Every structure is written in C-alpha cells, then in structure tokens.
Amino acid sequence: MKISIIFPMYNEADCVEELLLRLYKILQTRQESFEIIAIDNGSSDDTAARLKSHGVIFEKLENFSSLKIVQLIRNFGYDSAVITGIEHSSGDKAIIMDGDLQDPPEVIPHFLAKSYEGYDVVYGKREKRTEGFFISLFIKVYYFIWSRIYSKTFPDKAGNFGVIDRNVIDLIKALPEREMYFRGIRAWVANNSIGLVYARNQRTKGKTKFSFLKYVIYGINGITSFTVFPIRAITVTGILGICFSFFLSLTIIFSKIQSFFGVTQDSIRASGWSSLTLLVLVSISLNLFCLGVIGEYVGKIYAEVKGRPRVVVRKTDCIKGRKSN
Ligand code: UDP
Ligand code: MG
C-alpha cells in the first residue's frame, strides 16, 4: 500500500520545516510506503529551497518513496495546485492537506483508519470555523445556498483535508475540464464518503492567502462550476417580470378607458417621479446583475474552450527514498 500526501504552498517558507518534521514523525510509525507531493504555487520566497533542504530527512525512513517538489511558474490558485498534485500521485490513496500547518498531520492515521473501512472519500470536518465573523457568516450563507440549489451537497464544516481512494483519483484525472473546484468535484465523484471531525489549528506562521473578496470569488466559482441554477433563476425572474408587466399594462389600459369615459380621474398621470426613477434604477441594476451572471458562465466556457493547461510547471525536483522504484 502506497499513500501520497499532497499539499499546495504559496509563500509558506516559515511552515516548511515544522510540517516536514511532523509528517516524518507520523510516517515513521506507519507500515505503508509514502510519497509526498508539494506543489510550490509560484512562491516568491524560498519555499521550494526549504522543501529541498529539509526534505532530505525522509531519506532515513524505511517506508519513504519520494518527495516531489513541483514548482509552478506562478500562483494558479488553490484548486489547480491540488489537482496538479493528484495528477502527479501514484499512491493507492492520496491525502490532501493545506501546507500551512492548519491541518495537523497527527490526524492522518485516523483518516487512514476510516479510509480502510471502505470509504472512498474521508473528509475532515472542522470542529468550529476559525475564520473571522464576516467570513464565517458568508460561508454559512454560501453553504445554505448550495444545499438549496445542488442536491449532492456537503456540510458547511467540510474542508479540503482528507483522504481519497485510487478510484476517486482516477475519476478526477479522467475529467476533461480544466478549472476544477476540488471540494465539489470530490463530492461529485464520491460513491461513499464520510466526514471525520478534527480540530483545525489557527494559523501561527505566515499569512492567509484568502481575503474576503477572494472567498466571494471562490464561492461564485464553486456554484457556477456545478449548477446552472443562477441562469434558471434569471429566466424565472424574467417570466415573473413579464407577467407583472402584463398585469400592470392591463390596469393602465383599464384606468385610461375609465378616465376617457369620465368614470374616474386618470390616477396614472398623478404617479410620482421618485417611484418611477426607483423602478428604472432597480431594473437597470437587475439587468446588469443578470448580465454578470451570464457573463460568469460565458467566461467559464471561454476558459475551457481555449484549452490551455491548468498550470505551467517550471521545474520538478525529486528526493528519492528507500522505497522508490
Ligand atoms: N494556497 C495556494 N494558492 C492560493 C491560496 C492558497 O497555494 O492562491 C495554499 C496556501 O499556501 C496554503 C493552502 O493553500 O498552504 C491554504 O491557504 P490559506 O491558508 O491561505 O487559506 P485559509 O486556510 O486561510 O482558508
Ligand atoms: Mg490556512
């Protein structure tokens, strides 16, 4: 049995030494052989150099296969890095974790034990969210929307940390799409998955690479990669708008006829300027919003049609261990 451990790193030089050391301590207690795949996502610090220099500790391990350091030419984002790691993996199972020590390596044996019970996906569920109030609130609302619009959903405390089986790795590798939302794809290809609660650490070294805006963009990307619900919602809103306008025109025509025959005063003529302006503003913004939603999908089609590779690799280094073949 061979296990691949995959983590992306974008300017995480401060975390390298501790992460590798803690992984070493875990791996030396295991029977399986291990390969480590670190994706250096275009770091401008010395993340890759430190991975190379501290990575030699693994050479002592009996069950160590290799440490691959895949350096990308720039930061291609979290998901592209993880998928690149999965593409490079040759293990029977793969562990995906963050490279910033927030996902404690000490949890890996528990994940593996669950995986051996026959689950093809074991994902970590956070005990509680460590993000700030606004981001946590946004994530809650986001997952609520997810659960309403997409049936094959995942709980809001599910993270990327977890184990996937070889069949899941092969399915992900076989998918033709370039831009992938890992967490969603994992739920989509999984046959039987299970969540395992773990305590996610606070970040003690380095800084988060996700701003609130980046979370919002990440969220929109997640939804638009999985469902056309937003476009359907636009169609339904349009149909409702047409029905409403039709009803409004009927009442206007009716009141015109009434005023023509002198039954009532023409109440329409007395309608206010401000309400009219408001209506125009609302319809313009709604129009822009709808165009934006459609634009999101057109942008996705554009990116896929261009067919560019998901990432560009600058260089791959490999530290081989005793179990390498
Ligand atoms: N990361 C990356 N590219 C990005 C953002 C993040 O490779 O554009 C890596 C980062 O180095 C870390 C992991 O993905 O190892 C998780 O990122 P981060 O800690 O910034 O996210 P958070 O935990 O704050 O959600
Ligand atoms: Mg983090």
Image: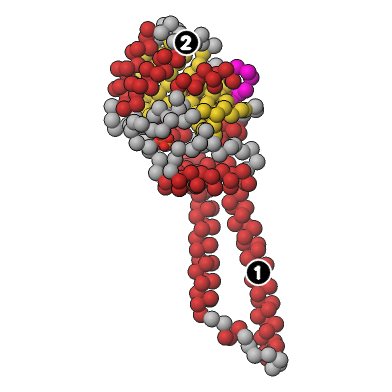
Pick the residue in front: 179 or 213.
213
The residue positioned 33% from the left and 13% from the top of the image is: 56
> Looking at the rendering, in which quadrant would you find the C terminus?
top left
Pick the residue in front: 147 or 65.
147
Q: Amino acid at mark 1?
A: Phe
Q: Amino acid at mark 2?
A: Thr
- Residue 278 drawn in magenta: no
Q: Main secondary structure of the magenta part?
A: loop
How many neighbours does mark 2 have within 10 angstroms: few (below 14), some (14-19), or many (20 or more)? Answer: few
Colouring method of the image: secondary structure
Q: Which mark is residue 132?
A: none
The residue positioned 50% from the left and 20% from the top of the image is: 108
Q: CA distance from mark 2 to mark 1?
A: 68 Å
Q: Is residue 143 above or below residue 280?
A: above
Q: State which quadrant residue 195 falls in.
A: top right
Residue 291, given in percent of the width and then of the height, sits at 51, 57
Pick the residue in front: 214 or 301.
214
> Looking at the rendering, in which quadrant would you find the N terminus?
top right
Residue 97, given in percent of the width and then of the height, sits at 46, 27
2 vs 1, front mark: 2
Q: Earlier in the sequence, mark 2 or mark 1?
A: 2
Q: State which quadrant residue 255 falls in.
A: bottom right
Say if residue 83 shows up in the picture: no
Mark 2, secondary structure of its residue: loop
- Give, as a single range, the part of the protein colored magenta: 116-121
Q: Is residue 185 above or below residue 5?
A: below
Residue 312, given in percent of the width and then of the height, sits at 39, 31
Q: Which mark is residue 29?
A: 2
Say if residue 197 shows up in the picture: yes
Q: Which residue is mark 1?
A: 244
Q: Is residue 294 above or below residue 282?
A: above
